[in-house]
Image (spheres, coloured by chain):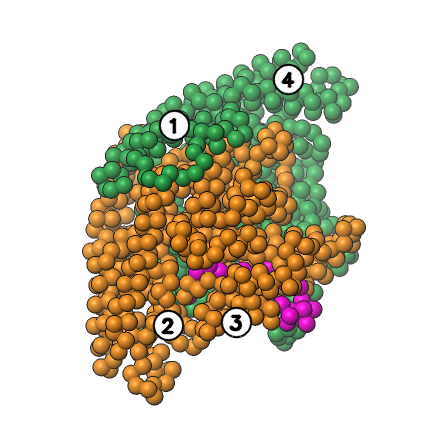
Chain colours: A green, B orange
Amino acid sequence: MDAHEFKEAATATIDDIIAYFETLPARDVVSRVEPGYLRKLLPSSAPQEGEAWPAIQRDVEAKIMPGITHWSHPGFHAFFPCATSYPSILGELYSAALSGACFNWICSPAVTELETVVLDWLAQMLGLPPCFLSTGPTAGGGVIQGSASEAVLTAMVAARDKYLRETVPAHLEGDAREDAVMVKRSKMVALATTLTHSSAKKAALILGCRFRAIKVREEDGYALTKVGLTAALDECRAQGLEPFFLAVTLGTTDVCSVDDFAGVAEALDEHAPAGQPGEVWVHVDAAYAGAALVCPEVQESTRIELISRFHSFDMNMHKWLLVNFDASCFFVRDREWLVQALSVNQAVYGNKASDGGLVTDYREWQIPLGRRFRSLKIWFVLRSYGVKGLQEYIRRTIKMGEEFAEALRVRSDLFEIVTGPSFALTVFRLAAKSESASLEERNALTRNLYEKVNATGKIWLTSTELDGRFAIRLMTGVRTTEGEHIQTAVKTLVEVAEEVMRG
Amino acid sequence: MDAHEFKEAATATIDDIIAYFETLPARDVVSRVEPGYLRKLLPSSAPQEGEAWPAIQRDVEAKIMPGITHWSHPGFHAFFPCATSYPSILGELYSAALSGACFNWICSPAVTELETVVLDWLAQMLGLPPCFLSTGPTAGGGVIQGSASEAVLTAMVAARDKYLRETVPAHLEGDAREDAVMVKRSKMVALATTLTHSSAKKAALILGCRFRAIKVREEDGYALTKVGLTAALDECRAQGLEPFFLAVTLGTTDVCSVDDFAGVAEALDEHAPAGQPGEVWVHVDAAYAGAALVCPEVQESTRIELISRFHSFDMNMHKWLLVNFDASCFFVRDREWLVQALSVNQAVYGNKASDGGLVTDYREWQIPLGRRFRSLKIWFVLRSYGVKGLQEYIRRTIKMGEEFAEALRVRSDLFEIVTGPSFALTVFRLAAKSESASLEERNALTRNLYEKVNATGKIWLTSTELDGRFAIRLMTGVRTTEGEHIQTAVKTLVEVAEEVMRG
């Protein structure tokens, strides 16, 4: 494909993408293909001779599109959003052209430096305490990771390294040190809650360390409390285990609950004082709801300033902040914690800038070596929308969540709100048909509602289970969703609920 | 940015990208900016109001481009290539528009299914044994990872899980099992060689398991041999350690050596027979040179069929196979090994397709949960170039490597080839000025040559150190590099070497 052919192909692709967004509302949200559909449509091996672009592009619409579930569809109310926007697409376009494995500063200084700058911008916008800025008082800073899973894994690796450095006697060396580390590791335990995202458990599994999920309760709004954490810390101690890591959440996946940061800090202070050897590393997972911190009223209501007591923070711009996947923005209070845990040298990567210590080499802040130019799309989105544009968008989607919840409340004969609305997420189930309805019956009827609504193809909902109760989640954060789509969702839910209630 | 503005912006971006590739040879390969250059050029916070696109785009050329090191520059002979090509860019473009967190099949069936199909195509093209195909006899298959580092980490996690399942007594449960696992883990050791990529060591560091690098020697062509591996296995056993993982390499980063697969298999068979509980998992890291397997003559010379004895294989299409970063293609002989090690469930991800067990949910094959539509760019590249087009490209770049090495040999008064050419990589140093020249003197002179050549800005070389010898690497794999650029590189090297030799 030469420049001329690329120009034609790319122009056609741009038109295709514009047409895609314009025809999106008319498509079913979720793909209806059967497993294995695509293999039947494709040759069993790659072509020997190169093919011309028009044939390839025709196959995108004919063969790929039927298998796409549309995350930017206005009726996408499942999980959390996975964003895209025009400025973000342009960022990917440049990034693909400038492809490089930018693991060290010298591998493209702009890739490293733009990342540092835009993550500082973001930290300011989110109202994070200054300790998370690269220019802050504690030599912290931000780095783009691929996903919140990578971020929590990275945090846990750094936390383990920090804990071992602080608690294994410094005079031990060589094999003796390795043996002592092994013994210590076998007692270390990572903590989270029963509503923490599964990525924390997966990180512990990858590290091969013990993991305990602290039960969170409905009466506490599904938040981790001082009492709950204190009990868990005491239990660990009684079992001879040493907690070194705790994942707290700002906006849990199931219900968007927020852990009690003040209570967590108090419980930890009583266990091991902040900043002392052997303190517990606290990672704040704000993957989805962290985006809402662009609004000062959310910074205030969540008391985000309290996280200066904690160690790391992560939010995904690719969820609710209009940057396409992947752009997980991970901040630490002290970047040396990452470098000490993750730096592995190899002669071929040596260079004057790195050896001089004047630059950031982000390979030392992450699991992989190579990295894409992901800050470009963040830069484009922040500049195109501006802070106000992003605030407006977040507020609009939160308001739609409130309108949706209000519509359910009006029909309390049909629906019971289980949690929310919280950060544009409402969790609900079918109202009890009678006072004597059993949990099983209610679950079965709610599931019936859920499946029938999803079968319409017009909207997509996901479900969860809370203390044995099957419940439906409806999220209103997608960029294309407008008031009219919420009304459609309500109408559909009411109609199907009435049908299900009638039996 | 509305559709109309996007159309204009994207058209301008396409023009920009075409102009970039056309003006590339005239630019310096490596950015010459000073650390911190970009912060001085940008505001200290994000704008409050959104900005129009033309202002943003102007800043790309004015502020970003000076800080770019050009990995597609014809004079880029550093590290390994990090590819891009027009069809690949189109793949990223569509992928950004179709952004979704496609962790489960239902989240976009096409994303999962195209990945399975194109990785089967790739496995066939590379001549991998059928056990690595999703349709093969052992229920294996491929998955796209972000980087070779992620792949080796994933392999090591799966290997540890498999080893523990096979060696910890099955009757142990609960706390007793957890304690037994901790004891076993403390004895487990991952093996690699002194030329294995640092990502293997980093993976062991993340897992928190012991790691031993087996020394490879010049007289063995820097390859791991049966003798070397047997000695290492014996030593581990003598120390009460249990090897569970071995990384072997097809094309080491430093010199592109290839470990002796037959010898490795023999040594392992004598240690613990293949397929028996407690066998050592062997991961083949072919991150760069694996691309050359598209040529049947390379399949033959590397005896790639032998890897059917091993457990996993990884190569990066984003290095030498014209797909832009990231596209690390990771294959396993039995996909259940991954699922058993990495599957972590959460109620909200439940769905009929997954629960029915008929589909692949790639989240269970990888560290992160979410994933991009990366198979699209692979599909576009395979179709646009065709197998023959890719073979032609690989052969052309290998041939340029041979021509380069031949040019050095002609000037044996100036240069000494240390290794290669191997897979388009030649490693060399300055010839000895006199018979009595010390290692230190030779290193200093070679480093002088290296720094002076890089300072020209016309080509970029990286260096390494082999048994104390400072050496220069020159790689000829970049898509835009032609014979004339090799001649320029030789001319520059000769001129500077003559100058350095003269003192």
- Label 3 amino acid? Lys
Using the image, name the chain to which the residue with label 1 belongs.
A
Mark 2 — residue? B418
Nearest-to-viewer mark from 4 and 2: 2
Nearest-to-viewer mark from 1 and 4: 1
- Label 2 amino acid? Val
Nearest-to-viewer mark from 1 and 3: 3
| Boundaries of the magenta span | B232-254
Which residue is drawn at the image coordinates 35% and 65% (left, top)?
B421
Secondary-structure class at tag 2: strand
**Distance of mark 1 from mark 4, alpha carbons?**
40 Å
Nearest-to-viewer mark from 1 and 2: 2
**Distance of mark 4 from mark 3, alpha carbons?**
71 Å
Going by the picture, which residue comes out furthest to the bottom? B436
Horizontal side of A431 relative to B206 (left or right) equals right
Horizontal side of B256 relative to B22 (left or right) equals right
Mark 1 — residue? A61
Mark 4 — residue? A414
Q: Are marks 1 and 4 on the same chain?
A: yes
Q: Nearer the viewer, residue B486 or B146?
A: B486
**Distance of mark 2 from mark 3, alpha carbons?**
18 Å
Q: Are marks 1 and 3 on the same chain?
A: no
Q: Tags 4 and 3 in contact by the CB under 8 Å rule?
A: no
Which residue is drawn at the image coordinates 30% and 43% (left, top)?
B86
Q: Tags 2 and 3 in contact by the CB under 8 Å rule?
A: no
Which residue is drawn at the image coordinates 30% and 67% (left, top)?
B405
Using the image, name the chain to which the residue with label 2 belongs.
B
- Label 1 amino acid? Glu
Residue A259 visible somewhere in the drawing: no
Mark 3 — residue? B215
